[in-house]
């Protein structure tokens, strides 16, 4: 085994003790075993799907009690944040909170610092809230069209908030480029009537430092995304190393993308990531896209009304999905992940780094099993001539279509025997007030 392969195993497996449950499938796919168990540096396929409940590392559950701190108005908020101690609940009086605020304190896993609306109060937040500390929780706020949350810290949580009416370049939850953030959770929020990205990160500052972000049980509804070349709702760009990013149990309803080239709903470009048990409805022609990613998983999702799944990169798993009106696309491309220098798998953004390329990577060694819906192997963008390679098709409901000259080494068996248990989510399962299985 090469030194580079050993380093990759070390990175992935060092995370395993702190990522379990919802993140375990992604890490298992990344090859978290003794390096000696993977002959010739090859990574294992087909790790079993684990429970979707998250450990405290990513759940960051909030106790019902804590020291209540009254925040009477916007003029006092920053000072009270700066004085907050682990376990404090900063309870904001009703009203408008405009301006910029920064959380830089350190809570504790069992005693996070909570910034929340006081019981029965309507808090409208119109500025920028930067979470740069650790073990901080923001919940119960109504973010206006001009507001945003910037994540630069570790172990922070954004839960039970509403984000309404943001435009491109504003609003939403933004993980900033160049900072260290790990094990943050964005869950049970409502994102409504957006024109642009509800969550967007233009590259992880350093993949080793930015691990384990989880987006779960959010409700995305009535979004319009338009423009050329990757105007998307959810996006991670230009970072090709392993991040163990997890999207699970989110509901996307009426999300439209007018990009004539790619029409992406989700664009994932970090390895060992997962898109599990999500539902996409009333969103024709959008794609859940693994763009330049290895060892990632798309499992147990329900896509209806014309949404599709598109997979590029190496050693990915597409299992147990139910797709109606769209298709599962195993992509041909204009290059492979081998065409990226090692530096491009380590740092981000890759733009400007020597030799880094913007690729439509062809899919190699993809497992596609137990899916219901059309499957196309070797689906190309115009001008992409490098075929999908060594696709394994097992127990899918229908026989795959193979695009001539754009697929090689496809192996198919068990057609018509899909063991599929994907369940569509409803509004009761997501957003503000929905149950949180990770924090019973």
Image (cartoon, rainbow, N blue to C red):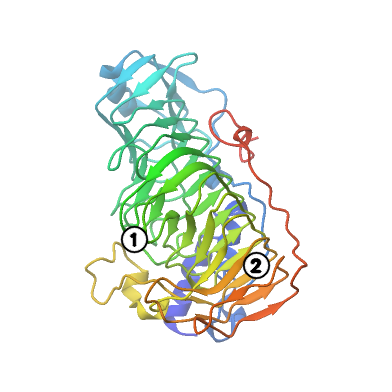
Relative to 283, 72 lies left or right: left
Quarter location, residue 118: top left
User: In the rendering, at what x and y percent does residue 57 appear?
Assistant: 53, 47
Q: Is residue 396 visible?
A: yes
Q: Is residue 44 visible?
A: no
In the picture, which quadrant includes the C terminus? top right
Looking at the rendered structure, the secondary structure element under dot 1 is: loop
Task: Tell which of 86 and 259 is nearer to you.
Answer: 259
Mark 1 vs mark 2, CA separation in Å: 27 Å
The circle on residue 206 is 1
User: In the rendering, at what x and y percent does residue 352 appear?
Assistant: 21, 68
Tell me the crowding category of disc 1: few under 14, some 14 to 19, or many 20 or more residues within 10 angstroms, Cα based: many
Looking at the rendered structure, the secondary structure element under dot 2 is: loop
Relative to 32, 202 lies left or right: left
Q: Residue at 27% of width from left, 42% of height from top?
A: 169
77 lies above or below 270 = above
Q: Residue at 37% of width from left, 76% of height from top?
A: 383
112 lies above or below 234 = above
User: In the rendering, at what x and y percent does residue 58 appear?
Assistant: 52, 46
| Residues at circles 1 and 2 in contact by the CB criterion of under 8 Å | no
Residue assigned mark 2? 47
């Amino acid at each position: 085994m090469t030194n580079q392969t050993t380093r990759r195993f070390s990175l992935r497996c060092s995370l395993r003790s702190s990522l379990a449950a919802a993140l375990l499938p992604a890490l298992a796919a990344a090859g978290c075993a003794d390096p000696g168990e993977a002959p010739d540096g090859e990574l294992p396929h087909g790790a079993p799907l684990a429970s979707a409940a998250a450990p405290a590392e990513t759940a960051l559950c909030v106790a019902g009690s804590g020291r209540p701190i009254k925040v009477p108005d916007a003029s006092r908020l920053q000072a009270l944040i700066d004085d907050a101690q682990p376990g404090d609940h900063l309870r904001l009086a009703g009203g408008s909170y405009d301006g910029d605020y920064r959380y830089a304190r350190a809570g504790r896993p069992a005693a996070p610092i909570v910034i929340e609306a006081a019981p029965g109060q309507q808090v409208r937040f119109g500025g920028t809230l930067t979470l740069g500390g650790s073990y901080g929780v923001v919940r119960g706020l109504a973010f206006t069209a001009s507001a945003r949350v910037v994540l630069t810290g570790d172990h922070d949580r954004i839960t039970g908030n509403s984000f309404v009416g943001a435009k491109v370049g504003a609003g939403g939850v933004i993980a900033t480029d160049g900072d260290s953030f790990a094990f943050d959770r964005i869950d049970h929020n409502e994102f409504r009537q957006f024109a642009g990205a509800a969550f967007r990160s233009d590259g992880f500052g350093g993949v080793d430092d930015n691990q384990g972000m989880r987006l779960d049980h959010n409700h995305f509804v009535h979004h319009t995304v338009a423009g050329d070349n990757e105007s998307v709702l959810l996006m991670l760009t230009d970072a090709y190393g392993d991040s163990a990013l997890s999207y699970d149990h989110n509901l996307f309803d009426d999300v439209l993308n007018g990009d004539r080239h790619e029409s992406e709903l989700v664009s994932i470009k970090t390895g060992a990531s997962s898109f599990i048990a999500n539902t996409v409805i009333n969103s024709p022609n959008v794609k859940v896209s693994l763009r330049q990613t290895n060892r990632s998983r798309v499992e147990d999702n329900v896509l209806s009304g014309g949404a599709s799944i598109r997979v590029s990169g190496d050693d990915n798993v597409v299992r147990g999905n139910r797709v109606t009106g769209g298709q599962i696309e195993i992509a041909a491309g204009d290059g492979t992940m081998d065409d990226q220098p090692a530096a491009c798998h380590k740092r981000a953004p890759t733009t400007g780094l020597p030799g880094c390329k913007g690729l439509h990577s062809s899919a190699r060694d993809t497992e596609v099993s137990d899916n219901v819906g059309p499957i196309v192997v070797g689906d190309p963008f115009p001008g992409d001539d490098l075929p999908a390679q060594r696709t394994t098709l097992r127990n899918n409901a229908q026989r795959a279509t193979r695009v001539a000259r754009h697929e090689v080494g496809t192996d198919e068996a068990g057609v018509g025997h899909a063991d599929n248990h994907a369940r569509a989510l409803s509004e009761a399962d997501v957003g503000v007030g929905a149950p949180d299985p990770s924090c019973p």
